[in-house]
Image (tube, rainbow, N blue to C red):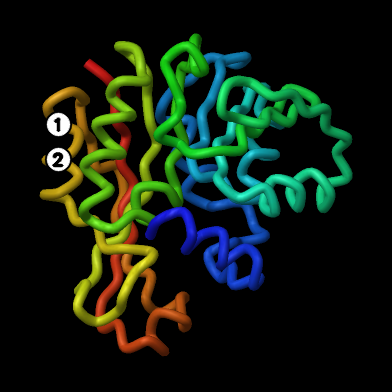
Amino acid sequence: MHQEFWHERWQQNQIGFHNEDINPHLQHYWPVLNIAPGSRVLVPLCGKSNDLLWLRAQGFEVIGIELSPLAVQAFFTENKLTATSVQQGKFTVSKADNLSIYCGDFFDLTAADLAGINAVYDRASLVALPPDMRTAYATHMQELLESGTKTLLVAFDYPQHEMPGPPFSVQAPEVNALYSAWCKVELIHAEDILEREPRFRDKGVSRMEEQVYALTVA
């Protein structure tokens, strides 16, 4: 899933991955991370997710990273937020009321861009990437995050041969392989979601488990 794929999805409004509702796992399990109010939270590959607004409402400074300028524009327009935009290195950074979205390639982010980040919310980033990009993603995340940074990670476990991603199946052994060398990895929730996700049943998926992890950088 390289850049052209995502640009085309947004241009053609093929954004079935977007959910208007606040993710229930974010609401239920974010408190488990025990992040201090006022902390800076990174949301990679954020799209126009309303989860950004929920995190801001909890008193956090929210920083999203999104490839598509159409997604960034839609987020601020649909939420009636007046943003100011500046060029910062390779990114166009749009800011409004304690919320910023960096428009550009995640892999261009530097540790300096994210100085002071205390937490990460990854609901649709790792699972959006094919296997050859997931290792690079985790390696780059390791370069960006300081010791003690916590991540709430949501992943899917399903028979990959039954449906082409995204979202891709990222099973527990792979999560551990990607993160355990530099993070403490805790599986805090697992749930069979096939009954309430007809779009996956319609594609022929026989089993789908959603898993929630808490990661802490060593």
Q: Amino acid at mark 1?
A: Ser
Which element is circle 2 on?
A: helix
Query: Can you give x and y, in whole percent of width and height, for residue 147 in the image?
Result: 30, 11
Classify residue 24 as left or right of residue 216.
right
Q: Quadrant of residue 53?
A: top right
**100 relative to 21, above or below:** above
Q: What residue is shown at x 46% (from left), y 17% (from top)? A: 118
Location of the C terminus (image quadrant): top left
Q: Which residue is painted at 45% across and 48% down in the image?
A: 123
Q: Which residue lies under the disc numbered 1?
A: 180
* 129, above or below 67, in the image: below
In the rendered image, the quadrant that contains the N terminus is bottom left
Where residue 186 appears, as percent x and y from the top left, is 23, 35
Tell me, yes or no, if residue 12 can be seen here. Answer: yes
* Alpha carbon distance from label 2 to label 1: 5 Å
The location of residue 18, given as percent across then percent down, is: 59, 62
Left/right of residue 95 with respect to residue 140 in the rendered view: right
State the residue position of label 2: 176
Q: Nearer the viewer, residue 169 or 102?
A: 102
Picture quarter containing residue 99?
A: top right
- Does residue 36 sit above or below 209 in this rendering? above
Quick check: marks 2 and 1 in contact, CB under 8 Å? Answer: yes
The secondary structure type at the circle numbered 1 is loop
- Asked where in the image residue 98 lies, by quadrant, the reply is top right
Q: Residues within 10 Å of mark 1 (few under 14, many from 20)?
A: some
